[in-house]
Image (cartoon, grey):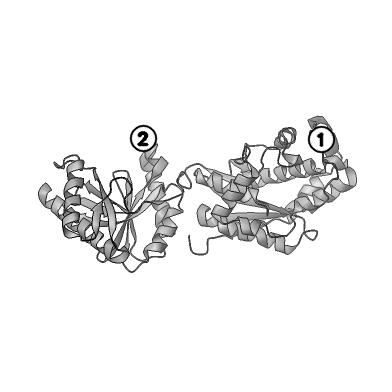
Amino acid sequence: MKGEHVYIVRCGETALKGQNKPYFERTLAQRIRRVLSGFPETKVERSDGLLFVRTLDTVRAEDVLRRVSRVFGVDSISPAQEVDIGGTTDEQALSMLGDAAVAWMKAAVADRGDLTFKVVSKRADKQFSIQSPDIASRIGGRILRECPGTRVDVHDPDVRLHADVRRGFAYVYEQKISGFGGLPLGTNGKGLVLLSGGIDSPVAAFLMAHRGMLIEAVHFHSYPYTSRQSQEKVRELAGILSVYCGPIRVHSINILPLMEQIAQRCPEEYTTILVRRGMVRLANLIASENDCAMLITGESLGQVASQTAESIVVVDQAADRPVMRPLIAMDKVDIMETARQIGTYETSILPYDDCCSVFLPKRPATKPALEHVLSAEALLDEETWMRQALESLETEAIRPRDEL
């Protein structure tokens, strides 16, 4: 490709997958192609455990870096200068690599003023006869001679200039821009997150997607007790998550029929537990119909009455598949910090009530016994409330605004 920019993408944990490594690399490459699909003539290639992204030089580097660094499975990305050394002797190749390094440092000095530097070399092609320390020493010497305003600092340099030699090509680069790491989306099945409008559940969805899980969402509301604004808030949260998780299908269900029955028929202290069990029963159905192997919630042990150990055990009895709780041992402060990092926090704290704020008991049971909860649940007309709730089901696919 003429007039191109080249980026080196490192695969992080994917590189440790042994015989399954090619599958993870292919999946990661497909995801990167998708998030860059809006840019013409973009290529993503695999080579020796790395991915190489090539774009036209008219594509802004910051747009590529922003999009690729947020793809799960990417450990880091570096804008690089590629040097074609195919068909050259090793001495000729080193001279060409030195030319590129000198040009890079001259541009850096022109932009930033006098600089200290260190050359870090890597000889991935072991047939290359000049070893890494000699590559670094000889290129560093050329920079000192040919780039006024530079001096060596091996401990804390302004510029850590990398010079990598690979089969047929060599690369010069400076930055290693960190990515989110984790595993590529789609390598660990699909889960259904119970997505409220709060802080916790979006973070739980993010963390499971970080481990390679595709995400769908179910949102429970109690309109008209809660406003349409609370549902729009969830759509906004799903839109933010889709930046990382890809398109998310959100299934919205009005759970008011269950809540009204509980308020009329059951002991008040079991209200929250019974609502949670009802949500899980509905989520089971949605998960089954959409091939979701597990449920995902934002519960953190002991955070509220429905998240005590005893309450969690009772709620789990209503599930017909594993319930993942990635936040279970996290402090609220840590959850909030993650929410800020991924961009969901400001939306999550908007003051719109969710369904859990309706019919709140004054003294919720914190150590419910399963037999007592089942006795209270037997007072409900499950067939009626489930039918009425499912009649309200609406499904919408939420997509990222610009694919990252």
Q: Residues within 10 Å of mark 2 (few under 14, many from 20)?
A: few
- Left or right: residue 70 versus residue 118 is right
Location of residue 237 in the rendering, given as x and y in whole percent from the top left corner: 61, 57
Residue 313 visible at all: yes
- Left or right: residue 175 versus residue 272 is left
For residue 11, which quarter of the picture? top left
Tell me the kind of residue under disc 1: Val
Location of residue 268 in the rendering, given as x and y in whole percent from the top left corner: 87, 43
The residue positioned 53% from the left and 61% from the top of the image is: 400
N-terminal-most mark, 2 or 1: 2
Location of residue 21 in the rendering, given as x and y in whole percent from the top left corner: 37, 39
In what element is the residue under mark 1?
helix
- Left or right: residue 36 versus residue 293 is left
Residue identifier under label 1: 373
For the residue pair 380 and 5, the one nearer the viewer reads as 5
Numbered mark located on residue 19 in the image: 2
Locate the N terminus and report the quarter of the image it occupies: bottom left
Return the residue found at the far bottom.
58
Tell me the kind of residue under disc 2: Gln
For the residue pair 388 and 175, the one nearer the viewer reads as 175
Residue 290 visible at all: no
For the residue pair 314 and 363, the one nearer the viewer reads as 363
- Asked whether disc 2 touches disc 1, contact meaning CB atoms under 8 Å apart, the reply is no
- Separation of marks 2 and 1 at Cα, in angstroms: 49 Å
In what element is the residue under mark 2?
helix
The residue positioned 39% from the left and 49% from the top of the image is: 76
The residue positioned 24% from the left and 57% from the top of the image is: 150
